[in-house]
Image (cartoon, rainbow, N blue to C red):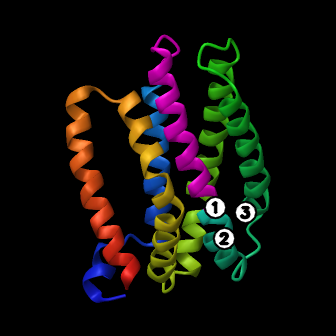
């Protein structure tokens, strides 16, 4: 990875915190009184973000942390990811009009908020102490893997964001998406 790309690339713990912020912001937009298409867009956006996030942690970040410490929070994190995936599967089987939809999404929110609190107070600070010299490299690996996971789903992402966003924001998103795809392709070539 060249120095310009490295300078733009968040390290692993920063990337994880950014993912948390994105998902929590999506949670805050969800209202049980919203139109079904808005609910579906927000739920699908949060669910995909959570799935990609969990996969990056399980494949790259957690193994690196496990090499240097026996952090009990990581032992607890994978079963929490499994419960999250179970709730996501339930949501994908439901329609937004289903009486259980809001409650299931709220349960997912509670679980994720608890998980985020544990990661940000127990796992990330320890990783920053013990892996400080490896966090940039881990961030690069995680970004490359994220692009691999998200690239085939860009159409779904755009549809879900359009469902959940006001019309003026969609134009801005379209420009950002095109820029992201161009940068992603350049990064993948390296």
Give the answer, above or below, for where 57 lies relative to 157: below
Question: Mark 2: few, some, or many residues within 10 Å (few <14, many ≥20)?
Answer: few
Q: Nearer the viewer, residue 103 or 96?
A: 96
Q: Quadrant of the N terminus?
A: bottom left
Q: Position of residue 189 (x, y in %)?
A: 37, 82
Q: Residue at x 55, y 46 (%)?
A: 48
Q: CA distance from mark 3 to mark 1?
A: 14 Å
Highlighted range, magenta = 31-55
Q: Nearer the viewer, residue 80 or 94?
A: 94
Q: Which label sits on residue 55?
A: 1
Q: Is residue 104 left or right of residue 157?
A: right
Asked whether the residues under the numbered discs 3 and 1 touch, taking CB atoms below 8 Å apart as contact, a structural biologist would say no
Q: Position of residue 127 (x, y in %)?
A: 58, 72
Question: Mark 1: few, some, or many residues within 10 Å (few <14, many ≥20)?
Answer: some
Q: CA distance from mark 2 to mark 1?
A: 6 Å
The residue wearing badge 2 is 59
């Amino acid at each position: 990875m060249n120095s310009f790309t490295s300078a733009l690339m968040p390290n692993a713990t920063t990337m994880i915190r950014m993912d948390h912020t994105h998902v929590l912001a999506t949670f805050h937009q969800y209202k049980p009184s919203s139109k079904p298409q808005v609910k579906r867009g927000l739920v699908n956006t949060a669910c995909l973000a959570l799935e990609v996030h969990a996969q990056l942690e399980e494949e790259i970040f957690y193994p690196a942390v496990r090499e240097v410490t026996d952090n009990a929070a990581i032992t607890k994190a994978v079963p929490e990811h499994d419960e999250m995936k179970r709730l996501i599967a339930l949501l994908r089987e439901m329609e937004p009009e289903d009486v259980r939809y809001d409650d299931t999404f709220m349960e997912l929110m509670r679980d994720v908020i608890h998980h985020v609190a544990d990661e940000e107070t127990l796992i990330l600070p320890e990783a920053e102490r013990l892996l400080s010299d490896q966090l940039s490299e881990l961030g690069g690996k995680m970004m490359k893997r994220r692009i691999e996971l998200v690239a085939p789903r860009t159409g779904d992402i755009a549809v879900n964001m359009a469902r959940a966003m006001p019309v003026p924001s969609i134009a801005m998103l379209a420009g950002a998406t095109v820029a992201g795809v161009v940068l992603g392709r350049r990064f993948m070539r390296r």
